[in-house]
Amino acid sequence: MVAALPRTGEFSFFLCNTLQGTTGTTCGPNMRRQYPIAIVGGGPAGALAATLLAEGGRDVVLFDEKLAWEKPCGGGLTHKALQQYPFLADAASASNLNSNFVDRCELISPSGKRVRFRMRYPVAILSRLALNGLLLEQARRAGIDARVDVRQERVTRITRTGRDWHLHTPQREYQASYLLLAAGARNPFRSQFLAPISSSDLMVTAGYFIPGHSALMQIQFLQGITGYIWVFPRADHVSAGIAGKMGESPTAELRRILEQWLDENGYRREGASFYSHILPSYRAQTFEGLEVCGDGWSMIGDSAGLVDPITGEGLYYALRSAELCASALLAGRPYEYGAMLAEEVLPELQLAARISQRFYTGQIFGESVLERMVALTAQSASIRDLMSDLFAGIQDYRDLRARLCRILPSVMVRGLTGSLRRSWRGSSASELATDLLSE
């Protein structure tokens, strides 16, 4: 059975289609029957896209087998995201998301050196279950002349006849005029449009939701792993996890490292829930050849690989890609979505990918970049402000080297002692910034 989504005022579309089928009558572009836009995936990207499309007058059918569900990531909304989407800031401040605003951070180097500092812009840390639930509910309420039909069904097959899509679920078959894929990095339909994501472009994450309270966000960098351990304090529990490039360490080994670290740092796992997930973490060459749309389809969020390869942060990019894609569709120029991403989003992610390997595994004057970064953060208020702005999302990578060049001379003049002072002797601030952020 094919599910129809009839709308008041669409009789003309039906009549036009009938006339075409029986008499060959040609209809103008505004008389063609339109099926809804189909969105596969009800996470933040899919839910926001559904809301914006419905508000713009387009019918949407959104599919997600789980609907709102948890993920092992911290669920942090940066200051940049909260500024871009004030409704999320309002909901977080009103505790509708069971959120926790955290402004204290601890960085830990691979050797165990620690520095704590107060962030100038708090991070809103929340449950992904709550965030997804809020966005899905917003989608359900969206639109006046259009609607969002949220279906808790698993899409098992996607086919196409002419310009229309057919989406098959165990319950029924649906038709759509356009297809948005928002089902994550390993959605089963990607291979119908693009090559599967290489394992070299994926990151493995594993984590625990641990009962208890904390006011401190912690980031532990690791020796030999392109990733880190995180502890994000949510309102009623702690999200603790580990991320690493796929192929570097087996998931079981990452879990062992995380559990050992939790035990050593006083986090008891009794009553904790374990989760794991796969995230995109693209290399620079992958971003350079990135495709996100084609004839009648687009990919947004994790499906498009829009995740920062250094930090693993993807929420802002998921929401922004949904916004850009919806804007292009409502303007009737869907191919412009790719161009808008290339102009606004991809340069930042490409640069992050180019410096990611240097950031995690590079050396500077015989010491790792990570060790040097933690030491600098401990010794300089200006560097702490810079780190705070990075966590807030308002310091982009393109201007980072210039800012370091402005900061480092004063740091050096203030007389760093010991090995730091000796190792920097004769080096300019520009040379040091280049070593730290070499592409």
Image (cartoon, grey):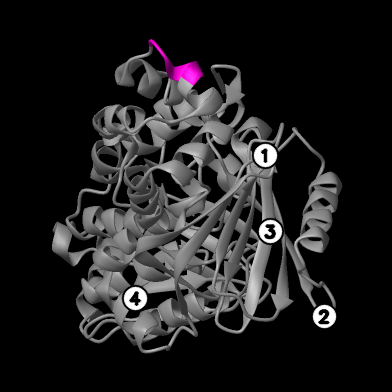
Q: Total marks drawn?
A: 4
Which residue in the protein does label 1 denote?
Answer: 110
Q: Which mark is residue 241?
A: 3
Q: Which mark is residue 88?
A: 4
The residue carrying pointer 1 sits among few (fewer than 14), some (14 to 19) or many (20 or more) residues within 10 Å by Cα, namely: some
State which quadrant residue 147 falls in. bottom left
Residue at 68% x, 34% y is: 199
| Dot 1 amino acid type | Pro
Horizontal side of residue 23 vs 194, given as left or right: left
Q: Could you tell me which secondary element the residue under label 3 belongs to? A: strand
Q: What span is colored magenta in the figure? A: 422-426
Q: CA distance from mark 1 to mark 2?
A: 29 Å
Mark closer to the chain start, 1 or 4:
4
- The N terminus sits in image quarter: bottom right
Q: Position of residue 356 (x, y in %)?
A: 51, 31
Q: Position of residue 99 (x, y in %)?
A: 47, 80
Residue 389 or residue 164, whichever sits in front? 389
Q: Could you tell me which secondary element the residue under label 1 belongs to? A: loop
- The C terminus sits in image quarter: top left
Give the number of the mark in front: 2 or 4: 2
| Dot 4 amino acid type | Leu
The residue carrying pointer 4 sits among few (fewer than 14), some (14 to 19) or many (20 or more) residues within 10 Å by Cα, namely: many
Asked if the residues shown at circle 2 and circle 4 are in contact, with their CB atoms under 8 angstroms apart, the answer is no
Q: Could you tell me which secondary element the residue under label 2 belongs to? A: loop
Q: CA distance from mark 1 to mark 3?
A: 16 Å
The residue carrying pointer 2 sits among few (fewer than 14), some (14 to 19) or many (20 or more) residues within 10 Å by Cα, namely: few
Q: Which mark is residue 12?
A: none
Mark closer to the chain start, 1 or 3:
1
Residue at 22% x, 58% y is: 327
Mark closer to the chain start, 1 or 2:
1
